[in-house]
Amino acid sequence: MNVRDYMTVSEVAAALGAPARTIAYRLKRGLMRGERVTSRLWLVPRDEVERWQGRGKLPPGRKPRGGTEATTDPPPVQDPSQS
């Protein structure tokens, strides 16, 4: 194993423009190839990083429930005396 052929989670995160937690999650779930060296250290092959770079932006995480888009304005308050 040549050290130059592998990248750490933080290096992968910087290369892909994603949070390190996202990279660690994908490694733990087997969505991304990597080798666990110790309980806290993952090494990811450079060719795996290049494969993910070819996909473009990482897909977003979970979508909000409910089917409606969130708005920044709160709903209007109705005056009970007008009902």
Image (cartoon, rainbow, N blue to C red):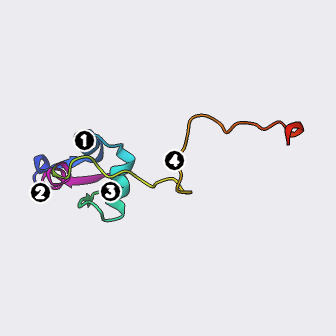
> Which residue in the structure is indicated by mark 4?
69
> Which residue in the structure is indicated by mark 1?
11
Percent coordinates x, y for residue 44 in the rendering? 22, 54
Secondary structure under tag 2 reads loop
Q: Give the label, 4 or 3, closer to the camera.
A: 4
**Span highlighted in magenta in the image:** 41-53
Q: Residues within 10 Å of mark 3 (few under 14, many from 20)?
A: few
> Which residue in the structure is indicated by mark 2?
1
Task: State the separation of the CA atoms marked 2 and 1.
Answer: 18 Å
Task: State the separation of the CA atoms marked 1 and 3.
Answer: 17 Å
Secondary structure under tag 1 reads helix
Q: In the image, what residue occupies the spot 56% across and 57% down?
A: 66
Q: From the viewer's perspective, is 10 left or right of 52? A: right
Q: In the image, what residue occupies the spot 11% across and 57% down?
A: 1
Q: Main secondary structure of the magenta part?
A: helix
> Which residue in the structure is indicated by mark 3?
38
Q: Give the label, 2 or 1, closer to the camera.
A: 1
Q: Indicate whether residue 49 is drawn in magenta.
A: yes
Q: Residues within 10 Å of mark 4 (few under 14, many from 20)?
A: few
Label pair 4/2, CB-CB below 8 angstroms? no
Q: In the image, what residue occupies the spot 12% across and 54% down?
A: 47
Percent coordinates x, y for residue 48 in the rendering? 17, 56
What's the residue type where badge 2 is placed?
Met
Which of 64 and 15 lies nearest the eye of the viewer? 64
First of labels 1, 4 by sequence position: 1
Task: State the separation of the CA atoms marked 4 and 2.
Answer: 48 Å
Q: From the viewer's perspective, is 63 left or right of 42? A: right
